[in-house]
Amino acid sequence: MQTGNPLKKRPAGVRWEKGCAFVRVWAPHAASVTLVWKEGQHTLDLKKAELGYWTAETRQLKPGDLYYFSLDGGEAMPDPASLSQPRGVHGPSQVTDLSFSWSDQGWRNPDWGNYIIYEIHTGTFSESGTFDGIGEQLDYLKELGVTAIELMPVAQFPGDRNWGYDGVFPFAVQHSYGGAAGLQRLVDKCHQKGLAVILDVVYNHLGPEGNYLDSYGPYFTDKYKTPWGRSVNFDDAYCDPVRRYFIDNALMWLRDFHVDALRLDAVHAIRDFSPLHILHELNHAVRRLSESLDSRKYLIAETDLNDTRFIRPAAEGGYGIQAQWCDEFHHALQVAAGQERVGYYSDFNGLPDLARALENAYVYTGQYSRERHRYFGTSTKGISGDHFVVFSQNHDQVGNRVHGERSAHRVSFCMQKLLAAVVLLSPFVPLLFMGEEWGASTPFPYFTSHTDKALIGAVEEGRKAEFSYFQKEGAPYPANELSTFQKAILNWQEADSGRHKVLREYYQRLLQLRKTTPALLNYDRASVSVMCEAKKGVLIQERSYKEQHLYAIYNFSGNPHEVRLKREIFPLWVLLSSSDRRWMGQEDCFLHYDHESKLTVPPESVILLANYHVPS
Amino acid sequence: MQTGNPLKKRPAGVRWEKGCAFVRVWAPHAASVTLVWKEGQHTLDLKKAELGYWTAETRQLKPGDLYYFSLDGGEAMPDPASLSQPRGVHGPSQVTDLSFSWSDQGWRNPDWGNYIIYEIHTGTFSESGTFDGIGEQLDYLKELGVTAIELMPVAQFPGDRNWGYDGVFPFAVQHSYGGAAGLQRLVDKCHQKGLAVILDVVYNHLGPEGNYLDSYGPYFTDKYKTPWGRSVNFDDAYCDPVRRYFIDNALMWLRDFHVDALRLDAVHAIRDFSPLHILHELNHAVRRLSESLDSRKYLIAETDLNDTRFIRPAAEGGYGIQAQWCDEFHHALQVAAGQERVGYYSDFNGLPDLARALENAYVYTGQYSRERHRYFGTSTKGISGDHFVVFSQNHDQVGNRVHGERSAHRVSFCMQKLLAAVVLLSPFVPLLFMGEEWGASTPFPYFTSHTDKALIGAVEEGRKAEFSYFQKEGAPYPANELSTFQKAILNWQEADSGRHKVLREYYQRLLQLRKTTPALLNYDRASVSVMCEAKKGVLIQERSYKEQHLYAIYNFSGNPHEVRLKREIFPLWVLLSSSDRRWMGQEDCFLHYDHESKLTVPPESVILLANYHVPS
């Protein structure tokens, strides 16, 4: 029927190799496809190939050239697999040479268990809002102690202000961030500094403005609904080139941009009943690439399904993804810290659920969820802790508040330190949200720069409805206003001042502890035990490795609490107290430590004890 | 939050036990639920229980009483879990005592591999169109040699003429068929005669008329689309009572009606992304029931997904269903027998695909399907042949033709015998469609007895569109006309006359062979080998068990073909030739058998050879 597997041929798009442009576009219902460049002065008719692909090879089209496609002689449209959109989502695509002079030959992607992730929104991380702006702060991040940065999506989106989840050209790097070369420079520099790079990619939907894919072919299906519009066609008629398109996209970041891991956005909205789920197939492809590069690459899934099928190995019927985000850990933690039980927080009871999360990663492992109106979740038994990424804040949890409030805006200084400790001393892979470590005063509201007025209005209405339970806090900032975006830009001056600096040094100390303490790097969940005294607001987590035992004693309440410790765990060393003068940034609170058998834990604080001496 | 698991309590509906009526209905959004009976003379307010259930117990409501429910004082509606609708789908429900004096204590459900299935539509199988009408023909079926009957769905549907897939009361047995007691009598009689009973149940949709479920609660979801309307809510909010409803339904047939196996209609239209798929959960429940009854019960799935997840064991990530229907075997076989390659037949090339089907069950195990516009299917490696149910005809394949034509209307008498042999000598579980064994002259067109005029018109239009590729054959019979239904009623007189009788005796001989020949009961697919000479129209299948080897030589062409046999397989015994005088019903065709090394196989015929002597 065809010669060779057409899905194993060159990826779609215009690929520049050895002085020649290889052109490939998928348009299964077109009768003709024409490449148009030099503002229409040049045209080239593509040849029909298998499965609805159209191809051409030409030496006339060169890097930097702007081009369009025209289907059946119709309107010129950008390339669905464009590598660059220098004039935005509605403009022409640009031929881009992805070759780059890499200097990261010495780089080795660390074991996944060593990842400590720092999530970054490129546009608001620095004043310049570019990849180079991030590159200037790598020494800061190294000193802080994180081991990986995670970039929120960088695929070309409408305008120049967006969280990134409205991207419409999955292969094009946002031009205002610095484009493909800018991203390559950043990854190269990260690797030189010893930092890994995770990229957030969106395969469950495309943005609402500038999405030309539908004009080319059945990239979407009406079989399923997603909260963000039409579902990507992963299992309906014509799905193979669509599946290939997204798999090629993943492979491009890992191969051509040297990215170390991909964070797959909202995979619960990827609907695929194929025998081989697209994530399973993607995982196979990434493994093959890792082998061919002799370099490990990781996949991380965002999912709210509490279903271990994503992270179980293939032999056990899973998709073999390395790790998944664990929102329930966040929700339980925030309620323990005083978050009102509204909206999705209403399913969480605070400390007992936080204890469950520390033991099981998921809070819901089969119980009835009132918010979901169903029994929910599966057991995580037998799955080690490094399969879960946890956080006390992230772009969503901050940004999906009415005014994009961080924890720093909502909880006390002491409580911020408590939250940090729970995350960084947990048996899971921790993630920080940029600026969290100094309690940044800048909010992270939702922002866009759409041009379609009806869409702008619809987004506003949608967000009001979504967060109606926060209504008493007023209306959200208007997403499409420049000022909303500007509010989110980090103020690096404050990072070094007063309490901000104290908090930052506290995070630094926790990160240092995590990286140097074997018991904290042990992801065997059987080695973790949690005791919860919910009425007192006290939670004690024990973590062990061989003869090493660590006890984190958290007091979430506003009162000091005396904790009696088992005799056998002495002698103890205090490794860290969030409430002593060094970390309080004030001198009126001291640790009361009775060497006999009891400890007084100050309000909203954590004490970390060990049965061995670690030099501070 | 609740005491005990509310899903483990009594099933919904009115259940009569020990002189008391236990009433339970799920209406999660109602503020009050009232039971109304004796034409409104009696009412009883139900009490709110967990998960949106409402319950009551009363000794005033007795078997035979007609009743309704009223939600929030609104219109009276029948019970979603009604056991009987004596006045049709819009009428009241009737309290029904399911206790029955069973006399099948000696019955043992045979091993699944011994099933030879005979599919029956109750309404057209006999003149009376009732379960008792089937009961009168059990001796005939025993003599024919099948081991199980499979009843097309019997759940209450609108009117009294319907294939059964428009059922709207899954727990009520169609009143015009004889209701619950009629079905119990039939099953009991089958078991006494040594026949198993399979019931076809529809859990992927409900019919379009008389569906009151939506007025009670969110039984349906808009998350997914099915070809037959809204998707059953198996994984959205409030799904647990819906899941329980269908699982209870399955258990009721197996427990209270002594049904031996369920055929699950179109499970590809069951959309469920839960960690535990509803079919997997159902299979668990059926296994538990089997253990408690000390009697095996089987689940069979109709699916067109070519995905072994349904039939693989749970340990290998499957749902553990016993067997699945295999439509592709049918399609390949029919094209081999001359079916034009239109519609879904266009993906099949006849003999080579039939050879694939005989070897792999699925024809598509990963190749590109033009009709589906995608690469399709998975390997069936390691899955034994008894996981697949095959047929040359069934209600759908016959009924979904413009005029409900059976093979007997379309292919020669010789070819009918060839088709029968391919199915009955295959390494899969065979299914016959009622009347097929005598080449019934009655068609099996699609028929309904809806009362909603708009619906009647929509169904007609829908069917015309669905079978547009058969357009040159004229318009389908009008589904809602009485005469269309009447055309389908089997004419038992003809079964004993002329060629009809010859064909019947031929089927009988094949069934006898299948049941007594170890090589034919061997489902190990490694023991099957198939050789295809497509140009000649010849296909040779070898089946083995220990020292026993059988060769079925099929000639699909209109010309005689000489087949050279390997020397080592002699001496051979001819077990059966479809073309000799006994089975031809005419005397002008003889088997030419050269004892040296070659055989002449007459046109459109099969010769079955063995390396051992079986007395005929």
Image (tube, coloured by chain):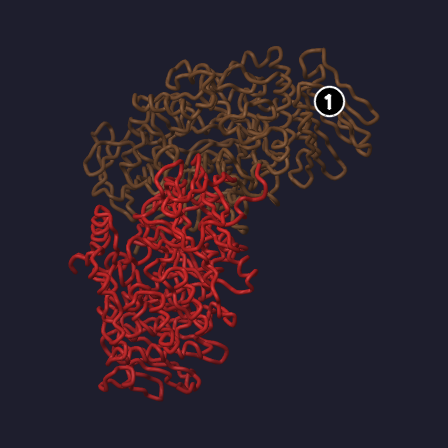
Chain colours: A red, B brown
Res A145 → quadrant: bottom left
In the picture, measured across the screen, residue A28 lies left or right of residue A352, that is: right
Q: Is residue B11 visible?
A: no
In the displayed structure, A98 sits above or below B472; it is below
Residue, x 32% and y 29% (percent of image)? B94
In-front residue for pair A150/B499: A150
Chain of the residue under the numbered disc 1 shown in the image: B
Residue, x 51% and y 36% (percent of image)? B261
In-front residue for pair A212/A474: A212
- Image quadrant where one finds the N terminus of chain B: bottom left
Residue B95 rendering spot, x and y as whole percentages: 33, 31
In the picture, measured across the screen, residue A482 lies left or right of residue B397, that is: left
Residue A552 rendering spot, x and y as whole percentages: 36, 77
Please state which amino acid type lies under the numbered disc 1.
Answer: His
Secondary structure of residue under mark 1: strand
In the displayed structure, B172 sits above or below A320; it is above
In the displayed structure, A346 sits above or below B339; it is below
On the image, numbered disc 1 is attached to which residue? B561
Residue B212 rendering spot, x and y as whole percentages: 29, 33
The outermost residue toward the right is B596
Residue, x 53% and y 58% (percent of image)? A289
